[in-house]
Image (cartoon, helix red, strand yellow):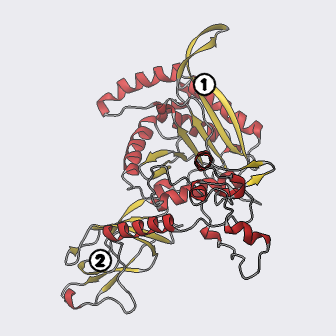
Amino acid sequence: MSIEIKMPALSPTMEEGTLAKWLVKEGDTVSAGDLMAEIETDKATMEFEAVDEGTIAKILVAEGAEGVKVGDVIAILAEEGEDASAIEAPTGGAKSEAPKAEEKADVQETRAAEQKAAPAAPAPAASAASGDRVKASPLARRIAADKGIDLASLDGSGPGGRIVKADVEGARPGAAPAAKAEAAAPSAASAPAAAPAEAKAVWFDESIPHEVEKLSNIRKTIARRLTESKQQVPHIYLTVDVRLDALLKLRSELNKSLESRGVKLSVNDLLIKALGVALEASPKCNVTFLGNELVSYKRADVSVAVSTPTGLITPIIKDAANASVSSISTQMKDLAGRAKEGKLQPHEYQGGTASLSNMGMFGIKQFEAVINPPQGMILAVGAGEKRPYIVDDALGVATVMTATGSFDHRAIDGADGAAMLKIFKELVEAPLGMIA
């Protein structure tokens, strides 16, 4: 009997996904554990493995198909001894096809032609003028001056009634637009219907060379979560300067001893360890706020921000306080490598009790990171650099980095966040204590 292969739920929050790539074709024989497809979820692009043995009889969802619901049948598997060619698609299961390249090009060309040919939509209820000042783009002002057009006589179609290039190009000197005449005595029949919410879009200047790229599921999730975080989580920022000289010396000595094992520690590996130890020593900062409840974690799982071609993802170093620095280094190399290939499993990036984001490799001196809910804090680390520094009551030169903690002020008081950063600073400046 044939087996229906359904769109899997590859993460707890996944409701639909994009079938990015088929790794098999109709007629191929598969066994349990064989890779069948790459599926883009709201978190990452993941590989989908076969569970049963058989022959791929029908592929019902083509590569590139978006919005495939979890549970939808995407392929049919013929069992051993079954005639794959005789199997038909399930009733009502029309084969989903991704748009072909030439069809996409036609659609884009048609859309561009329609936008160019369509008259500018009247501004909803905003006036182009604010007091005596006419709101217009610099390009629109230049064109109006060249054509002798009075900007005050025009209705703007840009944001807030701003006059843009299209408004001026279609106007004649001394002629008021029809919209002005209609505005004097509007009727219910001629009043435009309110545009649906989804039709509202951010305006941009199409005269500038550009390209439009559809957002991936991952980028949509990042945008949604970061927006929610900044809107719903009251951030408090605390900053501390940390001397790195002792940590850099220890790193050099450890790398010499670990060279035979093929392990090379990065500064970030040691900072992960320091944050893990600081969190365990500061349980009031290792928390999640749940409205009427506060979750206090007994273990520090540090999520580490990794930049990938599709966006930011945060693989987790579990129990960072008690893991050896060599283990942290090995784990991070593996996790970061697979993150950039889109091959992390959900349990490797979902969860964590706090986060670390290091932009020092880009020469960034200081920044404030956005908290990754439901976590209660994130530590933003800048570049280590030579700075004038007071050492033993004398002015000297030291390697110093700036670290800024972002804390959820609903759950973490400023004093508790400051206490945690103090411990973090002490651990980095006297690092033997955290690896003993």
Instruction: Identify which amino acid the numbered label 1 is placed on.
Output: Val
Q: Position of residue 193 (x, y in %)?
A: 69, 77
Per the image, label 1 sits on a secondary structure element best described as strand
Is residue 288 at least partly visible in the picture? Answer: no
Could you tell me which residue is drawn at 66 percent across and 41 percent down?
406
User: What residue occupies the far front of the structure in this picture?
Assistant: 174
Give neighbour class at mark 2: few <14, some 14-19, many 20+ (Cα, 10 Å).
Answer: some
Label located before the other in sequence (2 or 1): 2
Q: Is residue 328 above or below residue 215?
A: above
Residue at numbered disc 1: 242
User: What residue occupies the far top of the structure in this picture?
Assistant: 394
Q: Are marks 2 and 1 in contact (CB under 8 Å)?
A: no
Q: Nearer the viewer, residue 329 or 378?
A: 378
User: What residue occupies the far right of the structure in this picture?
Assistant: 131
Could you tell me which residue is drawn at 76 percent across and 81 percent down?
188
Q: CA distance from mark 2 to mark 1?
A: 55 Å
Q: Nearer the viewer, residue 167 or 35?
A: 167
Could you tell me which residue is drawn at 57 percent across and 27 percent down?
428
Q: Position of residue 381 (x, y in %)?
A: 56, 34
Q: Is residue 231 left or right of residue 263?
A: right
Residue at numbered disc 2: 52
Instruction: Identify which amino acid the numbered label 2 is placed on.
Output: Asp
